[in-house]
Amino acid sequence: MTKVPGPCAGELGVGPRRWRTEGRAIMREIGIGLLGFGTVGAGVVDGLQKNAGVIADRLGVRPVLRRIADLDLETDRGVAVDRELLTSDAASVIADPGVDVVVELIGGTGVAKELVTAALEAGKPVVTANKALLAEHGEEIFGLALRKNTEIRFGASVGGGIPVIRALREGLVGNRIESIYGILNGTCNYILTRMENEGLSFDAALAEAQAAGYAEADPALDIDGFDTAHKAVILASLAHGFSVPMDSVHVEGIRGLSELDIRYALDFGYRIKLLAVIANRGGSGNDNGDASSGGIEVRVHPALVPLDEMLASVSGVFNAVMLSGDLTGDTLYYGRGAGKGPTASTVIGDIADLARTFQADCKLGFLPAGAAGPGRGVRDMHEVETRYYLRLSLLDKPGVLAQITTILGREGVSLASVLQKEGRSDDHVPVVAVTHRALERSIDAALADIDKLDIVAGKTVRLRIEGEKERVCGCVGV
Amino acid sequence: MTKVPGPCAGELGVGPRRWRTEGRAIMREIGIGLLGFGTVGAGVVDGLQKNAGVIADRLGVRPVLRRIADLDLETDRGVAVDRELLTSDAASVIADPGVDVVVELIGGTGVAKELVTAALEAGKPVVTANKALLAEHGEEIFGLALRKNTEIRFGASVGGGIPVIRALREGLVGNRIESIYGILNGTCNYILTRMENEGLSFDAALAEAQAAGYAEADPALDIDGFDTAHKAVILASLAHGFSVPMDSVHVEGIRGLSELDIRYALDFGYRIKLLAVIANRGGSGNDNGDASSGGIEVRVHPALVPLDEMLASVSGVFNAVMLSGDLTGDTLYYGRGAGKGPTASTVIGDIADLARTFQADCKLGFLPAGAAGPGRGVRDMHEVETRYYLRLSLLDKPGVLAQITTILGREGVSLASVLQKEGRSDDHVPVVAVTHRALERSIDAALADIDKLDIVAGKTVRLRIEGEKERVCGCVGV
């Protein structure tokens, strides 16, 4: 790292009209080594080039792109880079003494893991947007960063262009995190928005999303909820200070969601969103989320969100996260959750943090993940308590509802409201019910029995209701 | 500052199930000196006490309250503090060698300014929530912090419990900021929400807000827009790297806003909010906001916001800020903009940043405010271009609208739509019009002439329309 007189140096005498440069030390450079020159990589290069002056001026440090590694050195990325910066040898980028910070934008848990590990082993701070790597191997990666007294920053791994990890780790660091509700996958939110606005089926909306470039040819990672689950694991681990295993997370995607349920949910005043839910609810025990009291809820599934909640207003490819802390209450963060510019924005924000510590010649080390306590764990899904939306196909004859409510009642589930919907088929009618709060295990048990009844045609649809404040239901109880 | 073995020390061997403590150095303490033991001060004390373990565990540093200064040492603040911490001598708190960080929560520009200055002169970092101080004396205060190579952090000065300053300065540091739209005053937003939901007059809603404790007995600072303007000055200065003078900001409050306009705006698909608008629009020149091209727009006034924009969903005492950057696009931050817990949350977040640098034995110094360039300035209000909502009281006879449109047309203002509303009085009818984009100076000139016409009864109401994407108006043009 070399000290060079930057263009700001000449501005030092500008005086008190400025909030910034007076007394500024001579500007340094921080060398960036980029691993992965795909869409986001090109976005970072573009952002650093386009806003070089602004960034240097704000930071007092000049981020300089020193090397770029990618296997494909030919494709035009739409940004001008000196060919001499390009290499297919990623290890040489990490080893380059001019590279102060390694930016990993390869993705996945294969070569990306090897390279991130190598960079941290070399004591070089890492910036990454790799949610899969952190969700699957966070313990190992973060442990290594701690041992090497270096940093790994991963702001773009959740929420793309929304600085929500910064808000959680830094802004709300004084809070116990009570709940997190996240719309974290733009593909799913786009599909749900199109299904609602245009009355499309899931398949039609998915095809449209693929045609528009909002969904992959193989959309499984998005629509089956695993991308959202990766992000939920990162948020939950940061909020609650222990490593949440991916396999402890209950994951349901939106594949095959019926447009009927989107419509009926609206009738009840809800909009369906694919949500990550992370909740530290006392429930049956204390509020520390100890495993003994059931632990922290970490789950991903479609959910009904009240229309008057901010989260319900998040449409199209946008993402949003509602973080609720014991001091600050509800806070929400909204923006583009993916894409070239937004992701690059957050990657550059992370680079900037590291640049400031370089300028000050200090190492902050890895910021701890959160408050830990012994015995923490993820609450078993059966122990989760929430409200439910049920759509049953019932024979249209007297007494059928009584049979349903009897079974529900036996499991301790009571209904807040029931509506028989139009659109009956020859012999079955759709009946939609909303429950009061109930345990997942109780609903499971009740539905297992309900779906065996002769009066029930087909599997009952069960969706969870989330994010609503305690309120009196204005519907007629049953 | 003393090194003490903290409770984390015993956890160092917990191993890889944890994201955090492995390799952690011995925990230090950071001494806090609190100036001002009012509502927010008590909130900070409460938060630090209640979440002491969580905070220390996350930071690896233990914030310890060393001294509290207030003139009133008797009133019960609802938190237990050792009487020996209390003093009425603020200077002794700053001078105390055990005080590493000075937290100023007195407010205002009198004694608070003296004490903040004294703390910075002593080289001690300062955390403050004092928007008036920074809006009025930011240049001087920040210049001093730079000269003394210490920090002043002021996250709670805008948006209360929302970490929006952190998002702007750090998360979006790689972006040129294109626009900022802020709902920054909970009192005004509460009043507007109640006027809309209950059809209350401004006076009735203000009285209700006062009764509910959401408005001061003297509400001028809030309802006349100056509190919002203080916050706008801070945001604008940070975003654009020059010190925005308070007297360069166009400020209109919500005093006397008619419930009629709230209702008519809804008919057009808009909700009225008191907005801070900070925009860097090319307009007639380049996009650098040079004074030569008209500079940066910084203004505070009631505005019509499209109902489908996120900002329109912000109701009651909540605040929100939409930050748009050239890389990340639109991002929004939402939460409680004031109050004990929310403000304390952000103050503690700032303390935590300083604590981490203490733990690492480093001084980051004052983070620069933004990208500066010579010749920057605030755009003259006459040069602002936006769309307008106009409510005219016109005689109900043929040809009156032609007279209006002739005058508007002469000034280059064209109408997107016009509606004659019911609720006519004996001889006048309310006519509401929405314009295409026009210069403020053109509207001023047109209204000056329009309001002189015999066919016009009373002053025409003029409100600005903000925050809408370019869209085709579905209304019938005139």
Image (spheres, coloured by chain):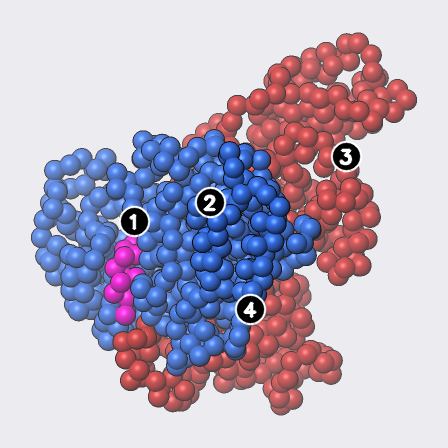
Chain colours: A blue, B red
Q: Which amino acid does label 2 sit on?
A: Ala
Q: Out of A106 and A181, give the one closest to the viewer.
A: A181
Looking at the rendering, which quadrant does residue B160 occupy? Answer: bottom right
Q: Out of B113 and B178, give the one closest to the viewer.
A: B178
Query: Label 1, on which residue?
Result: A221
Camera-nearest label, 3 or 2: 2
Rendered view: A474 above or below A470: above
Query: Label 4, on which residue?
Result: A326
**Do tag 1 and tag 3 residues touch (Cβ < 8 Å)?**
no
Q: Residue A97, image x and y in percent?
A: 14, 61
- Measured in 3D between alpha carbons, the distance from the residue under mark 1 to the one under mark 3, in whole angstroms, is 50 Å
**Mark 3: few, some, or many residues within 10 Å (few <14, many ≥20)?**
some
User: What chain letter is assigned to the residue under label 4?
Assistant: A
- Residue lying farthest top? B398
**Mark 1: few, some, or many residues within 10 Å (few <14, many ≥20)?**
few
Q: Please tell me which residue is depicted at 42% across the width and 53% down the height of the picture.
A: A301
Camera-nearest label, 1 or 2: 2
- Residue B186 magenta-highlighted: no
- Measured in 3D between alpha carbons, the distance from the residue under mark 1 to the one under mark 2, in whole angstroms, is 31 Å
Quadrant in which the N terminus of chain B is drawn: bottom left
User: What chain letter is assigned to the residue under label 3?
Assistant: B
Rendered view: B118 above or below A53: below
Q: What element carries label 3?
A: helix
Camera-nearest label, 4 or 3: 4
Q: Is residue B334 visible?
A: no
Q: Do labels 1 and 3 share a chain?
A: no
Please provide the residue range marked out in magenta: A127-139
Query: Label 2, on which residue?
Result: A457
